[in-house]
Image (tube, grey):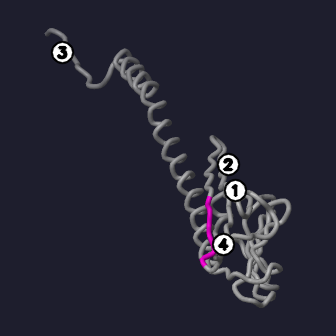
Amino acid sequence: MHGHKNYEKGFTLIELVVTITVLGIIAGITAPVIMNILSSMWFSHNSSAGHLVAREAFRKFSVEIREAIETPDSLRPYVSADGQSLRFYRGGNPADSIRYFFSVSGGSAFLFRSVGGSAPEMVPDYAANEVDFLTGSFSVDNGNTGRSNTGRVEVELVARREPAVETDSTRCDFNIFCRNFR
């Protein structure tokens, strides 16, 4: 009798090596494309977070600044000499002042608000969770410091996120006019 041929099913070593080589080439070509897409999505999220924080901070104090009233000189909107603090009044009572200022909290600078003698609160209150810095400056009447004569307040905000890969910064400049000034 002739020998019976025994066929075993499976892959040869050469077939496995060729398959692994082809998969490696495909992975090498597609990995940079996938990394670019993921990096773009991450950058977009960080950009929108910085923009939203700056927008919310602006919304909060623009409403209050617009309602500031024209008062005697001692109570007009006032910006400190370094441009880091803005104080204005909602009424004729000096105790009814609102102060916005940039200060350091946990090693990073953020925008804070205090009313009268109350404790400062971060603006917006979730800023530290979304961005690493919320800094900027205040000025009145076309870039000046001191008291406003026209009721015009200029605000520059910079919200920054510093991820391990790429720094993202959102800058917003606003001009706000107190409605009650003539």
Question: In terms of secondary structure, where does tag 2 sit?
Answer: loop
Q: Earlier in the sequence, mark 2 or mark 1?
A: 1
Q: Residue at x 62, y 56 (%)?
A: 173
How crowded pointer 2 is (Cα within 10 Å; few <14, some 14-19, many 20+) is rated as few
The quarter holding residue 69 reads: bottom right
Q: Are marks 2 and 1 in contact (CB under 8 Å)?
A: yes
Q: Are marks 1 and 4 in contact (CB under 8 Å)?
A: no
How crowded pointer 4 is (Cα within 10 Å; few <14, some 14-19, many 20+) is rated as few
Q: Residue at x 42, y 21 (%)?
A: 25
Q: Overall secondary structure of the magenta stretch?
A: strand
Q: Earlier in the sequence, mark 1 or mark 4?
A: 4
State left or right for residue 7 relative to residue 94.
Answer: left
Q: Callout 4, which amino acid?
A: Asp
Identify the residue under disc 3: 4
Q: Earlier in the sequence, mark 2 or mark 4?
A: 4
91 in relation to 104, above or below: below
The numbered dot on residue 132 is 1
Q: Residue furthest top?
A: 2
Front-most of residues 181 and 157:
181
Q: Are marks 2 and 4 in contact (CB under 8 Å)?
A: no
Q: Position of residue 20 (x, y in %)?
A: 41, 23
Q: CA distance from mark 3 to mark 1?
A: 76 Å
Identify the residue under disc 4: 125
